[in-house]
Structures are given as C-alpha cells and as structure tokens.
C-alpha cells in the first residue's frame, strides 16, 4: 500500500511590503439598484501597495459591482469609494489605473502595434513599446489586425493595453481566459513582477488555482458581503473550519459509495472508474474503518481541501 500524506502548498508568493500604503478602498459601501436589488451590503475592502488581491465569489455575489465602483463606472448608494485618496472619477487618479475586462474589445482593423501606440499616447508616462510587447508575449504578431488574432492572442493584447500607462493600480477581470498553459504561466509571471515593482493588482477569476498561485490575499464575497479574507492558506483553513476540519481521501477500493457514506464523519463519497474520493471530518477513524472493511485498499492519498473546496464550503455556509 502506498500512501501520500498531507500535501503542502509549494506555491511561491512575493511578499508584499511590511507597512503597505492603502491604494484603494470601499468603506461601508452599499449599492442598491432601482429594481430593489442590493448588490453590495455595507461592504468594506482595501487594496494595498505591492499586493495582489483575488476577489472571489459565486455569480451575483457583487464582485463586478465592487470593481465598477472602484473604476468609477458606478456610484455607491451609500458609503465611500476612494483610489489614491481621491474620487475614482478624478482624472489624476484614473491615469494611474489600468483595466483589463473579460468583455474588452478593440478596433478590429487596427494592428497590434497601432493599438499599443494609441493607448500609450493617452498617458503622460507610458511604458516603452518594446516592454509592453514583451510583457504580453506579443513578439511576432505586432503587424496583425486585432480581428485576425486568436482568442488567447486578443487576451494578451488587452493585457498589454492595461499596462500601457505604467499604472499603479491594475484591475484584471478573468485575465487568462482562452490562454494555453504556457501563456497563462507567462502572464502569471508578469503579474508577480507587477507586485514586485510595488503595483497593486485586483484579480477576479473563476480559476481558483490561479487565485491560489498568485494572490497575497483572497477576499471571498457572497450576497454583497465579505464572507472571509486572508492569505490562500488562511482561507483554506477557514473553509475547513466551516465544515468541520475536512480532509479528502482518495484511494482504490472495492467499497461502494453507498457504504462509504454510512461511515461516521463522511460527508461525501464518489467513485469514478478505479478512483474513490471521499470527504470526511474524521479522517483517522474513517481510514481505520475503511481498512478493516477492505484490506486490499491501495493507492491511498490524504490531502487537505483545496481552495475550491474551501470556497464552496464558505459560500455554502454563508447562504444557509
């Protein structure tokens, strides 16, 4: 029987400054739409210099509303929104921000080179053209029209446009959608470099492994409120606490799912092919009973819940 016990997260994070400056903040913000829907409910959120913050939540949780407020595209019903100590709609504040939206578009009949030069012209101190092309991995496609680019290439060009003004605060909305693994890792490296240069990044993503790999701090929102916030490790711990310090057991066993679900502490059990996966709040007792019932159990692996498991636990618990 082979066993792999308690995996550790080897993801490397660049440490943010010890005493970082608050770059942007939502203070006791409520956003109520004319149809009566409350998108944000007395929510407070701060973003600090040199920090990558991942804003997570289920659909309709209020993430997009929070970002729109920080971008100055919407006004709060109550509360205060500030970036660099000013109103987000203030010109001096806006030229220090960069934005990459998931639904971002660009003129189809302008070339990549033309798009970048155009955006650089909007800012007083833009990044050099060559630096933007390298940061977004656009070498070799600068003369293509935007309409000729693949989905992943369009994402990379929009990333370059977000960095054109050398912003101090960058909003990245689902930045790696459509990217292959290599391009995604290259963009991750560039995002880490931004933080290392003292830039602040607010990241929204449905790829929870992306948040786990990049974020110094994760903020989980649900129904317009902050459910929890902390480092990726702290959020995972909170998620485990929300469901009774869960562990995940994976193995090959002849025991069927219906029988496993009857074992004390087992919250869920699934069998897919030769692999059985179960979630339990009593891992040692569960393992003892499983081994007593199946002495041929093998390929055993016991791990802590991933960020995805913590996210589901926290948002489910908040909805009860």
Image (spheres, grey):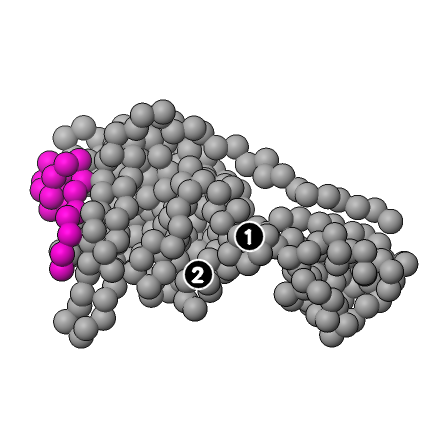
Per the rendering, the mark at residue 188 is: none
Give the mark nearest the N terminus, 1 or 2. Answer: 1
Magenta stretch contains residue 86: yes
Residue neighbourhood size for the residue with mark 1, other residues' Cα within 10 Å, grouped as few (<14), some (14–19), many (≥20): many
Q: Which residue is drawn at 11% across and 43% down?
A: 87
- Residue 110 drawn above or below residue 121: below
Q: Can residue 300 be seen in this view?
A: yes
Q: Which of 148 and 217 is in front in this view?
A: 217
Mark 1–mark 2 distance (CA, rounded to whole Å): 12 Å
What segment carries the magenta color? 77-95
- Residue 297 falls left or right of residue 29: right
* Label 2 residue SS: helix
Residue 23 in the image: state x and y as whole percent. Answer: 23, 35
Q: Which residue is drawn at 70% across and 61% down?
A: 277
Residue 252 in the image: state x and y as whole percent. Answer: 80, 59
- Residue 252 falls left or right of residue 202: right
Mark closer to the observer (1, 2): 1
Residue highlighted by disc 1: 240
Residue 73 in the image: state x and y as whole percent. Answer: 16, 54
**To which quarter of the image does residue 215 belong?**
top left
Q: Can residue 121 be seen in this view?
A: no
- Residue 223 drawn above or below residue 51: below
Q: Which of 149 and 244 is in front in this view?
A: 244
Outermost residue, right side? 295
Quadrant location of the C terminus in the rendered image: bottom left
Residue 184 in the image: state x and y as whole percent. Answer: 48, 44
* Label 1 residue SS: helix
Residue highlighted by disc 2: 315
Quick check: marks 1 and 2 in contact, CB under 8 Å? Answer: no
């Amino acid at each position: 029987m082979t066993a792999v016990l308690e995996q550790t997260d080897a993801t490397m994070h660049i440490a943010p400054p010890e005493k970082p400056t608050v770059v942007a903040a939502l203070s006791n913000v409520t956003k109520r739409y004319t149809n009566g829907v409350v998108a944000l409910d007395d929510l407070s959120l701060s973003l600090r210099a040199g920090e990558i913050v991942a804003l997570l939540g289920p659909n309709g949780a209020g993430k997009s509303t929070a970002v729109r407020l920080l971008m100055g595209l919407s006004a709060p019903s109550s509360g205060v929104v500030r970036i660099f100590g000013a109103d987000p709609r203030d010109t001096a504040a806006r030229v220090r921000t960069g934005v990459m939206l998931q639904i971002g578009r660009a003129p189809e009949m302008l070339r990549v080179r033309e798009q970048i030069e155009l955006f650089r012209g909007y800012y007083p101190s833009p990044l050099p053209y060559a630096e933007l092309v390298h940061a977004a991995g656009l070498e070799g496609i600068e003369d293509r029209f935007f309409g000729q680019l693949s989905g992943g290439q369009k994402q990379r060009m929009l990333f370059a446009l977000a960095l054109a003004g050398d912003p101090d605060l960058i909003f990245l909305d689902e930045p790696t959608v459509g990217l292959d693994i290599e391009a995604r890792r290259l963009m991750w490296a560039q995002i880490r470099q931004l933080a290392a240069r003292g830039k602040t990044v607010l990241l929204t993503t449905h790829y929870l492994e992306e948040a786990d790999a990049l974020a110094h701090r994760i903020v989980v929102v649900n129904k317009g409120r902050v459910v929890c916030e902390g480092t990726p490790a702290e959020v995972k711990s909170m998620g485990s606490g929300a469901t009774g310090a869960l562990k995940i057991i994976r193995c090959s066993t002849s025991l069927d799912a219906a029988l496993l679900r009857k074992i004390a502490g087992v919250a869920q059990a699934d069998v897919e092919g030769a692999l059985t996966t179960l979630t339990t709040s009593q891992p040692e007792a569960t393992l003892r009973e499983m081994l007593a019932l199946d002495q041929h159990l093998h390929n055993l692996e016991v791990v802590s819940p991933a960020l995805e498991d913590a996210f589901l636990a926290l948002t489910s618990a908040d909805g009860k």
